[in-house]
Amino acid sequence: MSLDKESLLRAYRQMKTIREFEDRANAEIMNGQIPGFTHLYAGQEANAVGVCEHLSGRDSIVSTHRGHGHCIARGADVIGMMKELFGCADGLCKGKGGSMHVADLDKGILGANGIVAGGPPISVGAALASKIRGSGEVAVSFSGDGSVNQGTCFEAMNLAVVLKVPAVFVIENNYYSEHTSISYAVGTDDLKARTEAFGFPVFVADGSDFFAVYEAAGKAVEHARSGNGPAGVFCEMGRYYGHFVGDPQGYRAPGEVKALRQDSCCLKNFRASMEEMGDLNSAELDAIDDEVMALIEESVVAAKSAPRPTPADVATDVYVNYQA
Ligand SMILES: Cc1ncc(C[n+]2csc(CCOP(=O)(O)OP(=O)(O)O)c2C)c(N)n1
Ligand SMILES: [Mg+2]
């Protein structure tokens, strides 16, 4: 697979930014600095970045309750996002969305979404708009293994095939839906076959391997963009944190998370591939680590001192004003 040096550096930077953002968000939430309910994406970074590296212009994404990684990968401003989590008036959504409702329409980020499988139907709408306009954009929805038992997901997949729209369904299997294992909650162990039964190709990847996801997503995006209708990407990779911050995780096997962190880290895997391929050296990656750490620190410092919305702000931005 040919990726130039700039793309490799950008992919690593994006994954590292997501990891640091999530680790820091976790620490700040545990310190009581961030209000609301938060679900962290650490461990799954390669899924978001491997997919979003294929997107540009007005290609859109719809995210989930575990959405920070998708938004960063699609280019959301990191300082604006940290401010949004803290509830600042100058956060990406003026502090009114918080962790679960980050959106930036100008960047094609149609929103994180607190409704499991709420994203696939939205992406079909965006894909239909693209088809009608003939603009060539693809619309990607990320959703979890829990979403594939939801009617909205099935309906969206079927409609995308019927309408032959450029939707890409990215299913992220992190083995749990809240605290319930996929082996208990999903009535088949062949989710690829279940999804393909709707009538579109699904490409499978190890979600801890950026290059595997990039390759699978490349095929899916190409299929959709070329006018062949929808496609799917199915990634498998566990999450490093609980379902939400503060989850005691009693349902996970002892040592499960430790093993994931040791053996299935997309950052470590990326570095190992670079050593093998010789395209980037470790000093270049270390320099990115330092820059990312500085950016995350800057984002938290900025968020802590930024103004909060006032009571007068409560009635603004609630409804869209359609009048010019
Ligand atoms: C329609 C709906 N049902 C239930 C919930 C409660 N809920 C929030 S997250 C979640 C689990 C989602 O699991 P999955 O789709 O695998 O995503 P993950 O959290 O693993 O990333 C559930 C059931 C919800 N938000 N929306
Ligand atoms: Mg899950």
Image (cartoon, rainbow, N blue to C red):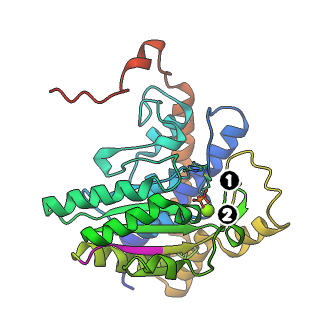
Q: Nearer the viewer, residue 199 or 90?
A: 199
Is label 1's Cβ within 8 Å of ligand 1?
yes
Tell me if residue 120 can be seen: yes
Disc ID at residue 176: 2
Identify whether 183 is placed above or below 128: below
Q: Compared to 38, does 151 lie above or below?
A: below
Residue indicated by mark 1: 243
Q: Residues within 10 Å of mark 2 (few under 14, many from 20)?
A: many
Residue at 36%, 44% (x, y): give it: 104
The residue positioned 68% from the left and 53% from the top of the image is 243
| Furthest-right residue in this view | 254
Closer to the camera in the image, 47 or 116: 116
Q: Quadrant of residue 161?
A: bottom left
The one nearer the camera, 160 or 269, is 160
Magenta segment range? Answer: 228-233
Q: Amino acid at mark 1?
A: His
Split into quadrants, the picture shows ligand 2 in the one at bottom right
Position of the N terminus by quadrant: bottom left
Is any atom of residue 287 visible in this view?
no
Within 10 Å of disc 1 (Cα), the crowding (few <14, some 14-19, many 20+) is some
Residues at marks 1 and 2 touching, judged by CB atoms closer than 8 Å: yes
Where is residue 313 drawn, in percent x and y? 42, 18
In the image, residue 230 lies in the stretch drawn in magenta: yes
Badge number at residue 43: none
Queried on whether the Cβ of the residue with tag 2 lies below 8 angstroms from ligand 2, the answer reads yes
Name which of mark 1 and mark 2 comes first in the sequence: 2
